Amino acid sequence: MKLWCVIAVLALSAPAFAQRPAHSKYPDGTGDPDTITCRTPQTLPGQRLLGPEVCKLNSQWALLRKNGQDISADGSQIIPDPKNSAVTPMNCTTAGGGATSGGATVCH
Amino acid sequence: MSLNIKHRVCIFFVALASGGALSAAAQDVGTRPAAPTESVTVTGIKDTEAAIDKFVGATTVATQVAGKLARWNTGVCPIALGVRPDIAKLLTKRVRDVAAEIGAPVNGKESCPTNIEIIFTAAPQALLDNIQIMHPVLLGYHENSAQAASLATISRPIQSWYMTATVDLRGRPQLDGKRAEGVTMSIQLPPAGFGGPATGAADTVELNMPGAIATNGTGGRLGDGISSVLYNVVIVADTSKLLGRDTGTLADYIAMLALSQVQQPDNCQDLPSILNLLLPDCSRTSNALTSGDVAYLRALYKTTPTANFRGQRNEMKYQMNKSLGVNQ
């Protein structure tokens, strides 16, 4: 009887466990666009305190990343993505080379 | 259903009388000299009626939950951002004035909770991305992220998004939408300005929705006695595509979008309307609200709120025909 009770409790609580949102330090929006992923709390600027957990749909995280953006540590606003802002696109050109060789690619 | 004898006798005499009239007319034609050919251009009644029919069909939209026409049942309180204060004042005053003229409720208080946000920006898509990420409830009813993304795509120089609510018999509004929440929120706007920079700092818009009640839209009809209302309208104007446009004209266009859940037409409408303003190669437009536009808005606010969508559309057509002198 006790065993059945335990099984029943586990079976009923399984969906609750399954529905818990995924957590990530840096959600990139991959996965089901309608599933929520939470970013783990970040340290608030100039403080030792942690900000709130920020939970968004994967589609929203994906849009943020596409636009080179992130959400502030306090979760209140959109800011430039610190990981993305340091990266600047490279300007590459191909110089020299003949019909058979590809020449040299120079990137700035 | 069979006709009784009285009706049959009546129909017989009517047929007899009309037959006589027809034969008399035929004889008349035979004896009368041929009349000179006249050129009469028949415009007006039939054309106007058809244009009204088409206009109502093209522009009205049913709410997703109740399936009815939505309109304001609380006082409108517009705010304009991204423009000089004098232009902002003109825009909001025009929306209030038109609302009062057409029978929509107006919140006369200076510091009222805004429910119409008119935002001018040179980066409308960035603003909509912001809304989609931070405040998707403002996009209006959507069931999933694909629908939200579609709603949040800018496709016109001036575009509007409608939050609607369903009002039950007790007059209690419930927001339409899966993820609707009662919130106060602020949106930071990209620095831009129509008619010059608005302020030194970036503008923010505060949205206060104290009465909002979170609900899950089932998409099912809730029965008779329910109606749809507008809860919040966001109007975004792309300053880069509106250069040289008259502010008064834009104010009228915005008023049309603010006071009704308009599906902006893709094609030039036969009924002269300010909604034709931003359509390419459309001559039937105006620099101000036309008599047809005013009739449309008045008709919307005269419809029976609890009637079904088809009935409401028919009521609107009837009212517009009446206003514009058709079917007199």
Image: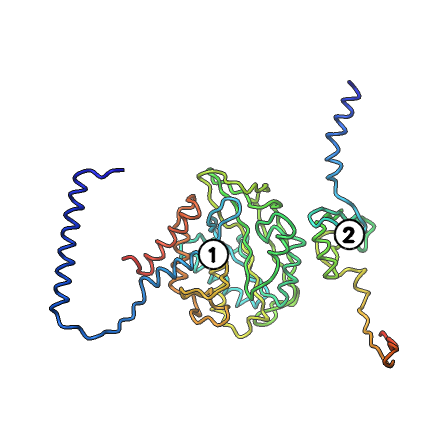
Mark 2 nearby-residue class (10 Å; few <14, some 14–19, many ≥20): many
Quadrant showing the C terminus of chain B: bottom left
Q: Residue at x 54, y 59 (%)?
A: B160
Chain of the residue under the numbered disc 2 shown in the image: A
Q: Position of residue B128 (x, y in %)?
A: 63, 59
Residue B26 sits in quarter: bottom left
Q: Amino acid at mark 1?
A: Leu
> Is residue A44 or residue B307 the one in the foreground?
B307
The residue that mark 2 highlights is A27
- Vertical placement of B230 versus B38: above or below? above
In this view, the residue farthest toward the top is A1
The residue that mark 1 highlights is B259
Kindly report which numbered mark, 1 or 2, lies closer to the viewer in this rendering.
Answer: 2
Contact, mark 1 vs mark 2 (Cβ under 8 Å):
no
Q: Residue at x 75, y 55 (%)?
A: A72
Q: Residue at x 37, y 60 (%)?
A: B50
Q: What's the mark number on residue A63?
A: none
Q: Amino acid at mark 2?
A: Pro
Q: Position of residue B104 (x, y in %)?
A: 43, 53
Q: Position of residue B34 (x, y in %)?
A: 16, 73
Q: Residue at x 14, y 48 (%)?
A: B13
> Is residue B17 or residue B328 the one in the foreground?
B17
> Is residue A79 or residue B9 the one in the foreground?
B9
